[in-house]
Amino acid sequence: MHPCSPCFRPKNRCYAQWSASIAALADDEEDVGKLGPSVVLGLMWGQHVANLITAWRAGDGYVSSPSTYIGNTGVGQWRPTPPANAPALFPFLPTSLTWVIPSPTSFRPPGPPALTSAKYTADFQEVKAVGSDSSTVRTADQTQAALFWFGTALTFWNRAAADTSVQRGLSLSQNARLFALLNVAMADAAISCWDAKYFFNFWRPITAIRLADTDGNPDTVAQADWTPLRPTPPYPEYSSGHASVSGAGQEVLTEYFGSDVPVTGWSETFGPSTTRSFPSFSAAADEANLSRIWVGIHFRTAVVDARAEGNAVAAYVMSHAAQRQHGHGDDF
């Protein structure tokens, strides 16, 4: 059964938390232990909305079958990367149904630089030096950041939103709007990014560096055994999924809370005991972007363009989704 099915009732921690929440609503009623009319009507309305969304997303283009996409072996083109040499993931995303933005192509970035350009040369030399598993120029803190962000993106921004919400004392309806905007923006940013990935089909640094003698650029030098700090994810390089999602996440939180809100977070790489702190949401996204170069899986142009893409997608979502139709004020 698909987890979005209206009759899906997982007997797990989430369901237990849901049940406890409903029980607490009952305790607030005059007739303790029973749900009053307002609560019942609220639950019915929530279920109705959930059913509408489920029906809307039933034909969203999601494909559960394994991918068979292997790109091609043209110069500058993506092909499976070692060590797994696996087919590319999520090739259906570029044609899937967006949440708010008009289409997956609406915010398509300009594309990677020409292989013989000065920009590509600079990108190539940077990631070759700083992104290698045996790099002598990457600092200890850059290595820590690269590993930290390798294990988090969507979860980091949701935790940042939750922590800031608690600090600001947001109401239930304010939180509902905040998390809807945040996650819809990140979802649309990912769809937009995957459109670019499969439209441009650009090769990853590990391929580019190992096959640099084929790119027609005299200033790029091949290294047959070059290996990134961490294994390369199986899909085309341009643009960066992490940078797109982080760009969208920081844009929503910055617009919602402000540009000077400190944030401290943890990642699944190290767990809650290891945190990194930033003076703002934007600064956290800056490091998330650079981490993709430091870990050896992206060129700088891909993260810069993806950040701009994510910012633009989020700005569109913030101005077109979850808008007040009646009344005024901060609560929804």
Image: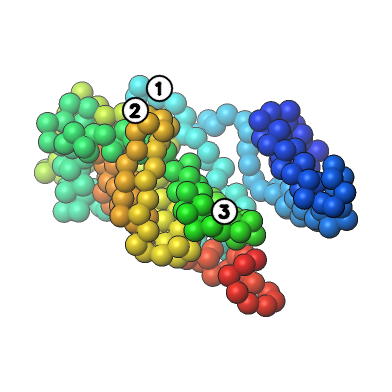
Q: Circle 2 sits on which residue?
A: 231
The residue that appears at 11% across and 44% down in the rendered structure is 219
* Residue 205 x, y percent position in the rendering: 27, 37
The CA distance from mark 3 to mark 2 is 31 Å
Vertical comparison of 17 with 319: above or below: above
Q: Earlier in the sequence, mark 1 or mark 3?
A: 1
* Type of amino acid at the residue the image marks with label 1: Ala
User: Is the C-beta separation of discs 1 and 2 under 8 Å?
Assistant: yes
* Residue 197 x, y percent position in the rendering: 43, 46
The residue that appears at 20% across and 53% down in the rendered structure is 119
The CA distance from mark 1 to mark 3 is 35 Å
User: Does residue 213 appear in this view?
Assistant: no
User: Does residue 281 appear in this view?
Assistant: yes
Element type where label 3 sits in the image: helix
Query: Where, quadrant-wise, is the C terminus in this rendering?
Result: bottom right
Q: Circle 1 sits on which residue?
A: 84
Element type where label 1 sits in the image: loop
Q: How is the image coloured?
A: rainbow
From the image, state whether disc 1 or disc 3 is nearer to you: 3
User: Is the C-beta separation of discs 1 and 3 under 8 Å?
Assistant: no
* Type of amino acid at the residue the image marks with label 2: Pro
Element type where label 2 sits in the image: loop
Q: Earlier in the sequence, mark 1 or mark 2?
A: 1
Q: Earlier in the sequence, mark 3 or mark 2?
A: 3
**Quick one: label 3, few (<14), some, or many (20+) residues within 10 Å?**
some
Q: Is residue 187 left or right of residue 238?
A: right
Q: Identify which residue, 169 or 193, lies in the foreground.
A: 169
The residue that appears at 73% across and 28% down in the rendered structure is 11
Q: Is residue 67 left or right of residue 258?
A: right
Vertical comparison of 84 with 311: above or below: above
Query: Where, quadrant-wise, is the N terminus in this rendering?
Result: top right
**Quick one: label 2, few (<14), some, or many (20+) residues within 10 Å?**
some
